[in-house]
Image (spheres, rainbow, N blue to C red):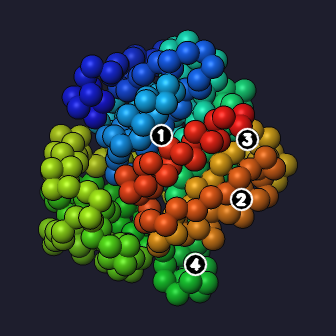
Amino acid sequence: MALQLFPDISKIAALRDGTKYAYIRIPAADTNKPTFLLLHGFPSTSYDWRHVIPLLKDLGHGVFAPDLLGYGDSDKPADLEAYSFKRMADHLVELVVGEGLEEVIGVGHDWGSTLLSTAALVYPNRFSGLVFTAVGYSPPVPFDLQSVNTMVKAYIGYPAFAYMEFFNEDGAAAICDSNPASVTSMLYSTTPEDWKAHMGTEGAAKEWVSSGKVSPPPTWMSGEEVATHVEIFKKGGYTGPLNWYKSFIRGIDNLLTAEFATDESKNLNIPALVVTAAFDHGSRPEFQIPAAEKHLPNRRIENCECSHWIPLEKPKELVALLEGFASAL
């Protein structure tokens, strides 16, 4: 929600294909300081970096935090094909180049980590470093949701991605648009265990949102912040955000997956930091590490004692990790 919430430090840019992106932009204090490209996930906007951005600015770092496609003040096409991760990666690089930046340190959270993975594979020379938070390095792979949930349930005792079945339904956006407070409450749950109950149980996510249920926010999120988040999605809706799931599940990027089919093609020599969340019952730490160990030879792995929402729960800890990572490049 860059333009509306942070008008003094935000811009909007129209790309060559006509797509418009809003983003927060703070130049680095000097040429020795890197710029961090902050990529949010679901259901978020640049607003979810609100605690991180001031800390990076105080350290003199540059910040580039877009409302990604379908979110906030950026365009929200209804067409599923628009949410190709390759297309959105092309958009990111065009935005970065348009700001006169040769390279950035990419920082992804949730789906932002998946988009960052694609962008780094396709445009490795644009990234001096990569940071994946909660969700680790995610190169393109064939994805069968039912098979994945069956395998995960056999391994950990519950289908961690059960909620995706609901999000992949054609009518899911209309249900979410009718109950935006319920969606916010479900995702930013009171406790990590509540998230597991609502998201990691077959049919529970749809039942929660359809019933309009709301629970108290987590201790690290104020009532005012919850209200702001709900208002953002009342205005923007859930068609675009849920298209990220549909794109991934329905194989919109099959050509990209085929291009990076071999193990070797997925390797990246860019310095990387993976920050897992100890109490994340969806993007569990043990799921995030194997791809990093296999494909990121110049990697470091850290863990935060929090749930999925690292930038909101542990902003100071995260920024300290970012500062240390950047200083070692």
- Which residue is identified by label 2? 291
Does label 1 or label 3 sit earlier along the sequence?
Answer: 1
Closer to viewer: mark 4 or mark 3: 3
Q: Which residue is mark 4?
A: 152
| Discs 2/3, front | 3
Residue identified by numbered label 1:
39
- Image-quadrant location for residue 93: top right
Q: Quadrant of residue 3?
A: top left
Q: Secondary structure at mark 3?
A: loop
Query: What percent of the width, then of the height, locates residue 238?
Result: 28, 49
Sequence-first tag of 1 and 2: 1
Q: Tell me the kind of residue under disc 3.
A: Pro
* Residue lying at 74% horizontally and 50% vertically, measured from the top left: 299
Q: Secondary structure at mark 1?
A: strand
Q: CA distance from mark 1 to mark 3?
A: 18 Å
The Cα atoms of the two marked residues, 1 and 2, are separated by 20 Å
Res 248 visible: no
Give the amino acid at mark 4. Val
Spot occupied by residue 211 in the image (x, y as percentages of width and height): 16, 72
Q: Earlier in the sequence, mark 4 or mark 2?
A: 4
